[in-house]
Image (tube, rainbow, N blue to C red):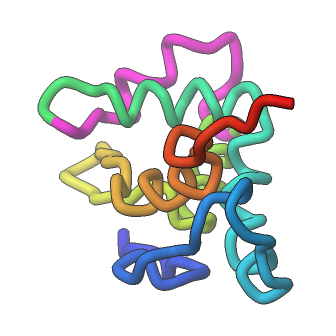
């Protein structure tokens, strides 16, 4: 299984946090698919399970039993995460292993960061 193209340059710094500067239309269009993918409760749980997996990766065989969903439904959600550039997948024999794209998660977290901005008191 090949890695999907990330809809934005995960190697480049993304942008300043939202609280520091407005996001351009181009940046918003590039990042929206990742946020949209995480907007589903099943995909958010899957992303959490993948990102927190011991050893940095997890087999689909360990993800599927955690949900009361069919295998094809879980596969659809994982495909959405791959297409959004949030995870990489690698087939090994009959199983597929997933790994979080931490650089993408850092960019998304940085965009939402409010820690670097001093709070003004009125």
Query: What residue do we see at 74% from left, 65% from top?
Result: 33
Q: Is residue 63 magenta?
A: yes
The correct choice, above or below, for 22 with respect to 60 in the image is below
Looking at the image, can residue 96 be seen? no
User: 1 left or right of 116?
Assistant: left
Residue 84 in which image quadrant = bottom right
Q: Which residues are magenta?
A: 56-72
Looking at the image, can residue 12 be seen? yes
User: 111 left or right of 37?
Assistant: left
> Where is the N terminus found, in terms of image quarters?
bottom left
> Where is the C terminus found, in terms of image quarters?
top right
Residue 24 in which image quadrant = bottom right
Tell me where residue 25 appears, x and y as whole percent: 85, 84
Q: Seen from this angle, which residue lies furthest left?
A: 55
Q: Nearer the viewer, residue 26 or 70?
A: 26
Q: Seen from this angle, which residue lies furthest bottom?
A: 26
- Number of labels in the image equals 0
Q: Nearer the viewer, residue 85 or 97?
A: 85
Q: Is residue 111 magenta?
A: no
User: 63 left or right of 84?
Assistant: left
Residue 87 in which image quadrant = bottom left
């Amino acid at each position: 299984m090949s890695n999907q193209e990330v809809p934005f340059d995960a190697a480049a710094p993304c942008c300043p946090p939202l609280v520091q500067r407005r996001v351009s239309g181009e940046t918003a269009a590039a990042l929206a698919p990742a946020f949209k993918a995480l907007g589903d409760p099943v995909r958010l749980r899957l992303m959490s399970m993948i990102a927190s997996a011991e050893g940095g990766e997890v087999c689909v065989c360990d993800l599927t039993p955690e949900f009361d969903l069919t295998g094809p439904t879980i596969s659809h959600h994982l495909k959405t995460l791959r297409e959004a550039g949030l995870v990489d997948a690698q087939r090994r024999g009959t199983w597929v292993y997933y790994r979080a794209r931490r650089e993408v998660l850092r960019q998304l977290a940085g965009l939402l960061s409010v820690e670097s901005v001093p709070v003004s008191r009125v």
